Image (spheres, helix red, strand yellow):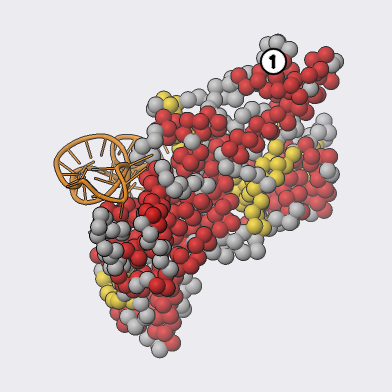
RNA sequence: GCCCCCGUAGCUCAGGGGAUAGAGCGCUACCCUCCGGAGGUAGAAGCGCAGGUUCGAAUCCUGCCGGGGGCACCA
């Protein structure tokens, strides 16, 4: 019996009690069971009676008693007790619990998926670091979290486009081009230019691609450095992200917004909706109509567009490309944008609550052995994505970044993540996955075929450690659904660590599966192998959602 | 001044109104000649402060204190 099946049985009990006139309440839409923290409180518990008591006008324990009486009859339920102020504590029949493993195996790689977002087309924009240098570690958090988010949304049935907004217009690109040119011709770094070591290397790559550049007139050379430098930067960024396991579907050029007419279309759209006005020689958007704290300039009095105009054109373009929902993952330093983006969507005639979602994530402090590392792209003192991956490997980096809530400013100690020991939770989880693999592999080598669920007596799985593991595996679909709905990938990681891997290690410790020496094959061998396969499946699927591998061996 | 995020164990962090607030590291004491010990068991140790809402608050609301980040016709 899975948690969802139990919740359905509980709901049926409430409905039956209402129909029988025992409870005068409206049946709530959400009738949930949860895993109690304390094992003495059964396999599952619910506070539904406490929630209904007030509306029913009856003492909670009384409500609990009458629901318990009805739930006791449900298939797969061994016992229901009323406890404390009115909790229902449910114990499942042993064979019923074993069916969790069957449902895991039946679903296989798709175990944990749901269809809450089926039919939704989502544009997920993340990273979008300026193409003026390598991806640095501050952006890596979004690469890890954003990609995990995309996988989670996909696991809930959404069609997700991963998009990178390339800021290839504006003065920072001019400075970048000037810096490359200066480095290539051996001159000093310009004022406000970029001075990292990479500038020299990238300048050389530009020359490798177009050897005659330095003999061009300065303005022409600068233009080539801008164009080719941008290509070099994007190639670099793309390849380091690819190495990190993050592939973007769309690299969207800011500059293209003007060329494609998207800017004009957006302006027209906003005028149509009646929120554009002119003042002080500039063109404004009246975002204060929708809660922004001040109106925003779209076109400056000198006739050039603002960055906000690009944002507007970009948003309108995304919607025109057919996305139901546009999710922006931004750093805390951009939180000031949220109000105006929302207002912008409203000005364009959308309901921002439906079409726009801005996730603000807090910054990462990078530490080296407890000491903060200051990062500045211009000064060239930074830890890049490639540096980090070089030190930790992709799995450890992605897992570490994805296991914390992005609401929290995170301290990432490079030295700690680098350690390949149990200090590092990713190894704990991966180790559980390799153990599962090794048991299954060893069984094969011993000539013990992997059993099929139909041939296995799951009621033999009665050991407390087996039950614990089964209960943990049963939670996976709900964890995935919650993580997707709340946009909190870290829930998956915590669940893998604290529920699955832990239960699997404990199961390992007490429940021998394969015969040793000249022992006979035990009756428990087949059901336990099945359980290991189920555990392996959940660990693979869960790590997969985080973009982390589940190795066969370590 | 205004806005956003955070404050939970010595450290890094979980904790969607529910029962005795959890994990890893570190610390203390144990277990293993066994399918891979990168394990397991036990222990010490904590919700910034003050109010409020609620049958019930780490969780929701208000104020204060502390830390971080923002408030351009910059990009």
Of the 4 image quadrants, the one containing the N terminus of chain A is: bottom left
- Front-most of residues A172 and A247: A247
Q: Which residue is mark 1?
A: A183
A479 in relation to A409, above or below: below
- Front-most of residues B17 and A434: A434
Q: Residue at x 61, y 20 (%)?
A: A196
Q: Position of residue A500 (x, y in %)?
A: 38, 55
Asked if residue A124 lies left or right of residue A55, the reply is right
Asked if residue B69 lies left or right of residue A552, the reply is right
Q: Residue furthest top?
A: A187
Q: Residue at x 54, y 43 (%)?
A: A144
- Front-most of residues A86 and B71: A86
Q: Quadrant of residue A277?
A: top right
Q: Position of residue A476 (x, y in %)?
A: 44, 60
Q: Quadrant of residue A519?
A: bottom left
Q: Secondary structure at mark 1?
A: helix
Asked if residue A499 lies left or right of residue A477, the reply is left
Q: How many numbered marks are there?
A: 1
Q: Position of residue A267 (x, y in %)?
A: 81, 46
Q: Is residue A362 visible?
A: no
State which chain disc 1 sits on.
Answer: A
Q: Is residue A462 visible?
A: yes
Of the 4 image quadrants, the one containing the C terminus of chain A is: top left
């Amino acid at each position: 019996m899975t948690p969802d099946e139990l919740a359905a049985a509980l709901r049926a009990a409430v409905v039956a009690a209402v129909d029988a006139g025992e409870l005068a309440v409206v049946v709530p839409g959400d009738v949930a069971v949860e895993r109690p923290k304390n094992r003495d409180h059964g396999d599952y518990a619910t506070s539904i009676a406490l929630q209904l008591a007030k509306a029913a006008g009856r003492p909670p324990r009384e409500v609990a008693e009458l629901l318990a009486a009805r739930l006791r009859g449900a298939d797969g339920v061994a016992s229901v007790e009323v406890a404390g102020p009115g909790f229902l504590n449910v114990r499942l029949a042993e064979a019923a619990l074993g069916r969790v493993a069957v449902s895991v195996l039946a679903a296989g790689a798709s175990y944990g998926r749901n269809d809450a977002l089926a039919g939704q087309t989502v544009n997920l924009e993340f990273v979008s670091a300026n193409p003026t240098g390598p991806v640095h570690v501050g952006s890596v958090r979004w690469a890890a979290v954003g990609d995990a988010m995309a996988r989670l949304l996909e696991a809930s049935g959404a069609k997700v486009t991963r998009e990178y907004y390339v800021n290839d217009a504006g003065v920072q690109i001019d400075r970048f081009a000037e810096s490359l040119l200066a480095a290539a011709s051996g001159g000093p770094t310009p004022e406000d230019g970029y001075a990292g070591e990479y500038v020299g290397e990238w300048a050389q790559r530009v020359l490798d691609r177009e050897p005659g550049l330095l003999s061009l007139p300065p303005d022409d050379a600068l233009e080539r450095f801008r164009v080719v430098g941008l290509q070099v930067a994007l190639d670099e960024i793309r390849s380091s992200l690819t190495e990190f396991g993050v592939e973007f579907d769309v690299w969207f050029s800011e500059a293209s917004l003007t060329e494609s007419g998207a800017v004009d279309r957006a302006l027209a759209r906003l005028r149509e909706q009646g929120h554009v006005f002119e003042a002080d020689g500039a063109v404004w958007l009246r975002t204060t109509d929708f809660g922004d704290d001040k109106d925003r300039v779209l076109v400056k009095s000198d006739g050039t567009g603002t960055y906000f105009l690009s944002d507007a054109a970009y948003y309108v373009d995304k919607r025109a490309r057919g996305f139901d929902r546009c999710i922006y993952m931004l750093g805390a330093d951009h939180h000031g944008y949220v109000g105006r983006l929302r207002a912008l969507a409203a000005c364009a005639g959308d309901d921002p609550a439906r079409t726009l979602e801005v996730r603000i994530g807090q910054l990462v402090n990078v530490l080296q052995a407890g000491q903060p590392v200051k990062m500045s792209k211009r000064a060239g003192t930074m830890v890049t994505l490639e540096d980090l991956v070089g030190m930790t490997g992709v799995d450890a980096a992605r897992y570490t970044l994805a296991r914390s809530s992005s609401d929290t400013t995170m301290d990432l100690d490079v030295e700690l993540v680098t350690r390949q020991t149990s200090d590092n939770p990713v190894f704990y989880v991966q180790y559980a996955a390799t153990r599962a693999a090794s048991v299954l592999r060893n069984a094969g080598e011993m000539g013990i075929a992997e059993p099929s669920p139909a041939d296995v007596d799951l009621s033999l799985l009665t050991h407390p450690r087996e039950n614990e593991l089964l209960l943990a595996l049963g939670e996976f679909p709900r964890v995935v659904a919650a993580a997707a709905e709340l946009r909190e990938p870290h829930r998956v990681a915590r669940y893998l660590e604290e529920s699955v891997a832990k239960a699997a290690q404990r199961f390992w410790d007490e429940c021998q599966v394969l015969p040793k020496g000249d022992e006979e094959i035990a009756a428990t061998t087949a059901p336990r192998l099945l359980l290991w396969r189920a555990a392996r499946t959940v660990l693979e699927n869960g790590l997969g959602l985080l973009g982390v591998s589940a190795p066969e061996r370590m």
